[in-house]
Amino acid sequence: MGNWWQSDLFYSYRTNPVAVISSVVFVVLGLAALFAPWISPTNPFDAGSLNLMNGFTPPFSANQFTGDYFVLGTDDQGRDLVSAMLYGMRISLMVGILAVGLAMVLGVTLGLVAGYRGGWVDAVVMRLADVQLTFPSILIAMLVAGIARGLVPPDQREGMATIILILSIGLSDWVQFARTVRSSTLLEKEKEYVQAARVLGRSHLAIMFRHILPGIVSPVLVIATISLALAIIAEATLSFLGVGAPPTEPSLGTLIRIGQDFLFAGEWWILLFPALTLLLIALSVNLLGDWLRDALNPKLK
């Protein structure tokens, strides 16, 4: 514990107010999403508890028909926006974290194998990565989502929507991990400790995952942190375009799409508050990623 407290990384963190504030904001929002069933005023996913008479209630006011008070107002279905945003953050953060996890596992594995084995394996993986980089990641995600929805029976699409989101974003974001890990592996595999492991008869898998991988974790963590913000934004974009989370279980992107339909009718709060929440999450994660990149860069020490 003492060594961790006195480490260069933690010293850099506690002396950087931007990193501290960003982490506090992200942790608070994450905990609020995690404990949404216990702290939200209502369950927005329970259609039986909704009252259409509460629809379009402005923020910080009581509904003129029912007398119910709502801090951030309600949407067109009478859902309390505070509750809808808390549950929406659960979906957005879950999709983002799992999608980045999928992209990281796939990209790190392919990058390690490509960099260590070389030859035709390296050529195939890198050419596949080059082809994918020619297209915007959001288009790749939409393509994967479209194919997946076509393979799923219509009556199961709504239930599989979250899984399809995770697959589409994860499969569109593995390239950065693979390219970074491959370049680091090309350098690490020529070092003396790897040569010693080969002399001792260690298997190729053991060398890659037990010797080389621990030495290249730092850039992977930086990419994962930045990719988390991009994945959350990608989820919101897909949901905004109507190919993401279903309206019955809205994410922040779905709430923004719903609010956009009523923006020019005067119900501005339906769009504003989910958009600000998404902005806070993405900004805090991006700022943490920027700090982590600088803190782990040996050239800046």
Image (cartoon, grey):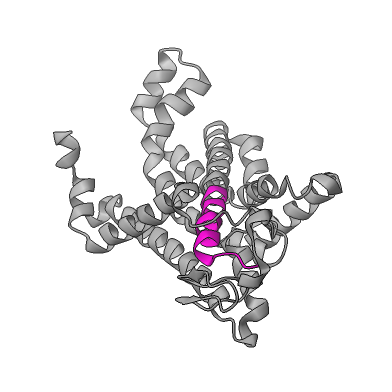
Q: Is residue 82 magenta?
A: yes
**Would you say 53 lies left or right of 191 here?**
right
Q: Nearer the viewer, residue 66 or 263?
A: 66
**Would you say 74 lies left or right of 293 here?**
right
**Would you say 300 lies left or right of 105 here?**
left
Query: Residue drawn at (60%, 86%), measured in percent from left and top?
Result: 266
Query: Residue drawn at (52%, 61%), measured in percent from left and top?
Result: 85
Q: x, y (%) of residue 214?
A: 38, 32
Query: Residue drawn at (33%, 53%), measured in percent from left and top?
Result: 292
**Would you say 290 lies left or right of 301 here?**
right
Q: x, y (%) of residue 194?
A: 40, 26
In the depicted structure, whether residue 73 falls above or below residue 135: below
* Residue 190 makes an appearance in the image: no
Q: Nearer the viewer, residue 26 or 210?
A: 26
User: Magenta residues?
Assistant: 76-95
Q: x, y (%) of residue 300?
A: 24, 57
Q: Nearer the viewer, residue 86 or 76?
A: 76
